[in-house]
Amino acid sequence: MAFSKVLVANRGEIAVRIIRSLKECGVRTTAIYSEADKDCLHVRLADEAYPIGPPPALKSYLQAGAIVELAARIQAQAVHPGYGFLAENAQFAALCQEAGLCFIGPTPDNLRLAGDKRRARQVVEEAGVPVIPGSHRPLLSVAEAQEVCRSMSYPLLLKASAGGGGRGMRAVAGPGDLADEFVTAAAEARAVFGDPTLYVEQRINRPKHIEVQILADSQGRVVHLMERNCSVQRRHQKLIEEAPAPGLTQALRESLHRAAVTIAKTVGYHNAGTIEFLVDQEQRFYFMEINARIQVEHPVTEMILGLDLIKAQLAIAEGRELGLRQEEIRARGHAIECRINAEDPALDFLPDPGRVEQYHAPGGFGVRFDTHLYQGYEVPIFYDPMLGKLITWGASRPEALARMQRCLDELVVEPIKTTTPFHLQVIRRPEFIQGDYRLDLAEQLLQEMDSGSLEAMQA
């Protein structure tokens, strides 16, 4: 069926992104907003908007029942969850289905599997795709962890079974650190996901984080949309992404694509998703996790392929076949994305909310800035500090990189402190310019810089 009205169950940048694509498809859009977001741009752009609760997300954007009830009451046919909040919540997707609403995303079963990292790892391993060496055993106590880790070599990683996004994850350098790190990881996993269960994996030395975008329709057709490098991270949070991923052999690139499609077909995946891998220094790859939603970094894929992934999600949700054949999908040029956060690098990336007094977005050929910012906007303290995503495209990687440097220099968001100066430092690093960087790049840069040089970045 073709949808005439869709409720966007999110806020800020991604809500704006979804609303714009839906409007181009002739779909009427409904926004929701907390008390802190009544003046947010997504509220202004939607055809209609409804309050959903007080500022804390637990009392507003995470109120699954209230959102479903609202969508049914206003006679929306579908709900788009964006990313974050309820986007990977299987119960929310099931509630939508029970209410006769289409959840524009993966099925509840897809979400349950993706959310259970141990089970997903086991299914993928049985499908013949390499996984990071480790244990499937659920760990609920320090004693259980010590027993499992006796037969493994350090360093190790403790991970939340129900987790993702780096939450509930702790590195363990040696046996003496295991107990303290276990307690910390389990407490975070309980607080964030409501489940303290952990599992353990070998820690890969200086890997690259490579992910493959896939689309899958209800007829079982699956295509990959190339890969992205997401190795610039701080504390497991992505900062810069690019596509295609530089520095991979063609054989490795094709192997990653095949593995992603195999995984999607094995689990009966539906709609848009991302299969994430680690690649070691010997160019061996290992499955890491399934991200069952639209990713923050999806624009770099859109820029090199000329596709709108939100419109693709909509088409799949409406039951249409994929209008893409794998052999027709070809990358053109290169794209880089920098996440612009309201954080102060000089103060250990402390969030810096407040009123935007001066705002200027960069422009020009090959430039895109996905944001909800405007002059006079009050950045709230209650949510993720990301203000927007600056994306540049070039016919070559050097051109995209030069364009990104120019755009970062142009961007003005004052007096709020942002990560913009830190991005400039990263993209000027020789290893980034050469395309041969790994997951430790951002942390290495921070270790090399003293507090004075960090403060100078914001001057």
Image: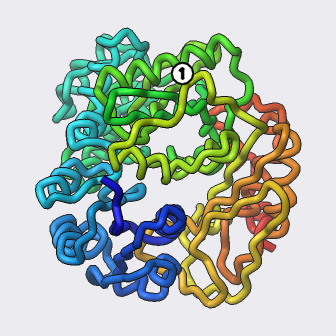
Marks counted in the figure total 1
Q: 380 above or below 106?
A: below
- Toward which corner of the image does residue 92 lie, by quadrant? bottom left
Colouring method of the image: rainbow
Q: Quadrant of residue 420?
A: bottom right
Residue 342 at what x, y percent from top left?
Answer: 59, 70
* Residue type, mark 1 in image: His
Q: Nearer the viewer, residue 257 or 59?
A: 257
**Residue 388: x percent and y percent?**
60, 65
Question: What residue is disc 1 on?
Answer: 257
Q: Quadrant of the C terminus?
A: bottom right
**Residue at the extreme front:** 1
| Residue at position x 27%, y 19% in the image | 122
Residue 408 horizontal side relative to residue 229, left or right: right
Image position of 205 (left or right of 384): right
User: Which residue is rendered at x = 62% and y = 14% of the image?
Assistant: 252
Position of 108 relative to 122 (above/below): below
Residue 111 x %, y %: 27, 41
- Label 1: state its secondary structure: helix
Answer with left or right where residue 350 lies relative to residue 95.
Answer: right
Specify the farthest residue to the left: 98
Q: Residue at x 50, y 44 (%)?
A: 236
Q: Relative to residue 330, is residue 427 depicted above or below? A: below
The percent position of residue 343, horizontal first and vertical second, equals: 60, 68
Residue 339 appears in the rendering? yes
Which is nearer the eye, 79 or 382?
79
Residue at 31 percent of width and 70 percent of height: 61
